[in-house]
Image (spheres, rainbow, N blue to C red):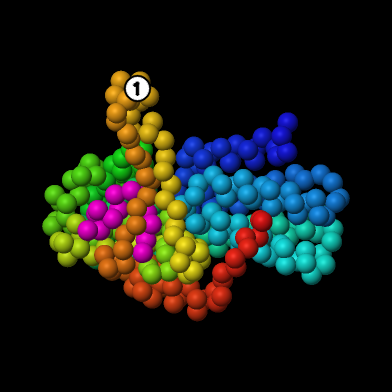
Amino acid sequence: MGRFPREFMDVVEGIKSMRIRGAARIARAAVAALRDVGNSYEGSDVAGFINYIKEASKLLVATRPTAVSLPNGLRFVLNKLLTDYSLGVDSVGELRDRLVRYCDEFINISREAADKIAVFGARRIEDGDILLTHCNSSVAIGVIKRAFDEGKSIKVFVTETRPRFQGRLTAEALSSHGVETILIVDSAARYYMNDIDKVIVGADAIAANGAVVNKIGTSLIALAAHEARTSFMVAAETYKFSPDTLFGKLIKIEERSYEEIVSRDWLNKYPNINVKNPAFDVTPPEYIDLIITELGVVSPSMFPILIMERYGAIYSELEPWE
Ligand code: RI2
């Protein structure tokens, strides 16, 4: 048996393999796993407990590199816990209780943020709008469902989102909610763009210049929307902000296995073919009209200002799990 319980390692593997996926969901799953692993810690050595939590956090952070919601969720919890520890909270029982409280706090903040974004975002959708969405963003879906629930008659084009077809999940979710849904291949986005009133997508990370990192293909859709003068909206919680980008670091784009695109057998027949599979791309702020956050709706250039005003100097060179 390894250092961590099987249930914990299942979550780590689940995030890596994308059984648990979607930026908001992986942040909540990681924080919940940290809470549970802390709860299962046996022993009374406080330094040992802190070390255990840091090690568990490192494993979670290493699962997927792009969705900054995951490290941000862990930072939220660990910064509070380590402050308590440095201020002299010195029993494992007390630290464990606080860990549980901070984890639950983050999970609630995340859920409430999505609810608020749905309210703010739905106000930007008008009766009769034809929308387009890409991939499977729980937050963008929340906005669309809310607009529908408010009685607006809307129609949604959904891209299938190759190579993993998360768009099918979106089509299932929207159609079973009663929303008129049209599933298209990703490359049909420009073909239909003149019929679309608004594009709405989620985000895995947002940079200090307001650029949005989201599922591969998003930036092509944004380009087509820009050309057609179709409004392009992003629905994202403030914890999708990447603090590293304030200091010139780039958001790492996850490169996934070629086997998500072609089989190993097929590729073995053509040794000169190289397959690339980046999971995300970057949409520049010029192509984004607005970002819907739980604190309100802002232009991409206002997004970092909003973050700094709300959270202050949030950057620290040393990660709490280091
Ligand atoms: P919510 C997903 O990433 C998609 O890129 C989606 O747009 C984004 O996370 C945000 O999703 P993946 O895990 O946080 O499918 O809005 O690679 O649910």
Q: In this view, does 49 lie to the left or right of 23?
A: right
Residue name at image x 28 percent, y 55 percent: 219
Residue at the farthest front position: 272
Q: Residues within 10 Å of mark 1 (few under 14, many from 20)?
A: few
Name which residue type carries label 1.
Asn
Name the residue carrying label 1.
268
Compared to residue 118, the image places residue 189 above or below, namely above
Outermost residue, bottom side = 309
Q: Position of residue 186 (x, y in %)?
A: 24, 44
Residue at image point 20% right, 49% down? 189
Q: Is residue 148 above or below residue 87?
A: above
> Between residues 71 and 246, which one lies in front from this camera angle?
246
Instruction: Please check the rendered image and state whether residue 213 is part of the magenta-colored stretch, yes or no.
Output: yes
Magenta stretch: give its range: 211-223
Q: Can residue 284 be seen in this view?
A: yes
Q: Residue at x 42, y 63 (%)?
A: 206
Between 134 and 316, the one nearer to me in the picture? 316
Task: Point out residue 11 in the picture as x, y percentages from the top left corner.
Answer: 58, 41
